[in-house]
Amino acid sequence: MEGTIYSLIPPIVAIVMVLLTRKVLLSLGVGIISAALLIGKFSPIESLQTLVISFYSIFVSDGEINTWNVYILLFLLLLGMITAFITVIGGSRAFGEWALRRVKTRVGAQIVTAILGVIIFIDDYFNALAVGQVSRPLTDRHNVSRAKLAYIIDSTSAPICVVSPISSWGAYIIGIIGTILTYHHISEFSSFTAFIQMIPMNYYVILSILLVFVTAIFNINIGPMKKHELRAIQTGQTFSTERGKVPGELKEDLPVSQTGSVLGLVVPIMTLIVSTVTSMIYLGYQESDSGATILDVFANTDPAAALLYGGIVTVVITFLFFVYEASIKKTLPFQVSSKASWQGIQSMLPAIYILILAWMIVDLIDQLETGTFLASIIEQSNFSVSLLPVILFILAGIMAFSTGTSWGTFGLMLPIAGQIMVIVEPSLLLPSLAAVLAGAVFGDHCSPISDTTILSSTGAGCHHIDHVITQLPYALIAAILSIVGYIVLGVTGSVWFGLIISLLLFGLIIGFLIRYSNQS
């Protein structure tokens, strides 16, 4: 079953079930069981062993604690506590009132969120969760749906990280590019220079970020997004209640200080940013040689550990704010702290359940070598050279969509693309590598089993399936335009001509969507 067409069954089953039933945990569970049955050759005992080992490996790997996964889960619990304390001390309420006086429109609230998404480019996990915490009070006050907020977060976090050299993504990608250049004895440019040159070649990133701002400015609501936005505008209810508890949403019986200030939100969030970035730099330097550059530091850092350390520091700071409100100002009973902590932890459990199951299915799909099978298709086929960039974009998108990981797609597809283009058409090497990056981000955006998609919905306080379904039409628009651009690039050999054609078509489609939105 490994490395064959049968390896596509589990991700297809999980994704189809998500779209049909809209029950994420059930769908992931069925996908996981189908993968285990394939790996265990339909033996109940071997399949059960596969399931147990896969679950166990989330927490323990090679006899040691799997710190990446464990730290991410612990950070989510800490984030729930931070959110609860910020709410109790009145920080969210005060920030919402402050922002409402300064950001006067729904458009302004969405633009502020998008700008934050572009500015915070250090790490996609951190981006999604931090931007969500800052923006949610603002967008809620202006009746912007949580689905729209999740779309803005997801369509700025990963795209900006994949073109930022000073980020966990950039460092990882530059490292892979460096290996490719060294292996093929390419010395006319460095890995860093190649990365910078590839930025305008990443059509999907450029188009998806542009689409976020245009959508906000012209209130473009396509497909299911229209339902969520209309409900938010007409009723003030920014999220759906028909799917049960919303990730990150607290119960309404917690007391809230009416004397809390904006500092109750700004200081904890700034603490989270500063302490996390400082931790990333410190951990990176600890693992780097003397004289290491900032890129080396980010390549060697541990983002999960940095998030955990930043979360611990921020919990302490928010708790001190609570102590001030409870002991000095006497606006809250002190016993509320334990209740707030517990509710904060509970609020993150739905996201944690989904994330654990997503990690399991990604692990089992990796064992089935689904990505290897998809990559072998292009290696064994004789495509026209001019079509290789667009084919790599599509295949990377399918792979990331099926496996739920853009990083895994980078690691597998970039070396394959490099090997093909060095032999076939060296002049298209960088455009083809950029097409892989673009396709991987696109597939990751659309995949319901992607951890970044899960964390974007968590940061926005949106039901995961609502986010997946409402974001899909926007991602497809950017992807289709990117496909046209890569076809033009391959035929003409001009990166800029491909980009200009994509942007011109983008303008035409936006004009149509604006008229469509106004008529509806």
Image (tube, helix red, strand yellow):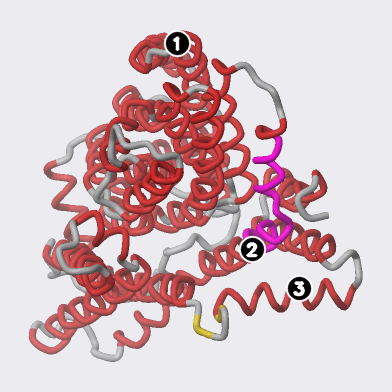
Which of disc 1 and disc 2 is earlier in sequence? 2
Membership of 364 in magenta stretch:
yes
Amino acid identity at mark 3: Thr
Q: Which residue is mark 1?
A: 512
User: Which residue occupies the foreground of this view, 211 or 295?
Assistant: 295
Amino acid identity at mark 2: Asp
Mark-to-mark CA distance, 3 and 1: 50 Å
Up-down relation of residue 52 to residue 436 (above or below): below
Residue 155 horizontal/vertical position (percent): 40, 39
Residue at x 50%, y 15% (from the top left corner) = 484
Q: Which residue is mark 2?
A: 363
Q: Which residue is mark 3?
A: 50
Up-down relation of residue 281 to residue 422 (above or below): below
Residue at x 45%, y 34% (from the top left corner) = 433
User: Which residue occupies the foreground of this view, 67 or 460?
Assistant: 67
3 or 1: mark nearer the eye: 3
- Looking at the magenta stretch, what is its main secondary structure? helix
Which of disc 1 and disc 3 is earlier in sequence? 3
Report crowding for label 1: few under 14, some 14 to 19, many 20 or more residues within 10 A (C-alpha). Answer: few
Residue 405 horizontal/vertical position (percent): 54, 51
Decide if residue 324 is on the left or right side of residue 466.
left
Q: Secondary structure at mark 2?
A: helix
Which of disc 3 and disc 2 is earlier in sequence? 3
Q: Secondary structure at mark 3?
A: helix
Residue 221 horizontal/vertical position (percent): 45, 28
Residue at x 42%, y 13% (from the top left corner) = 493
Magenta-tinted stretch: 361-377
Mark-to-mark CA distance, 2 and 3: 11 Å
Amino acid identity at mark 1: Phe
Up-down relation of residue 452 to residue 62 (above or below): above
Q: Label 1 near label 3: C-beta < 8 Å?
A: no
Membership of 95 in magenta stretch:
no
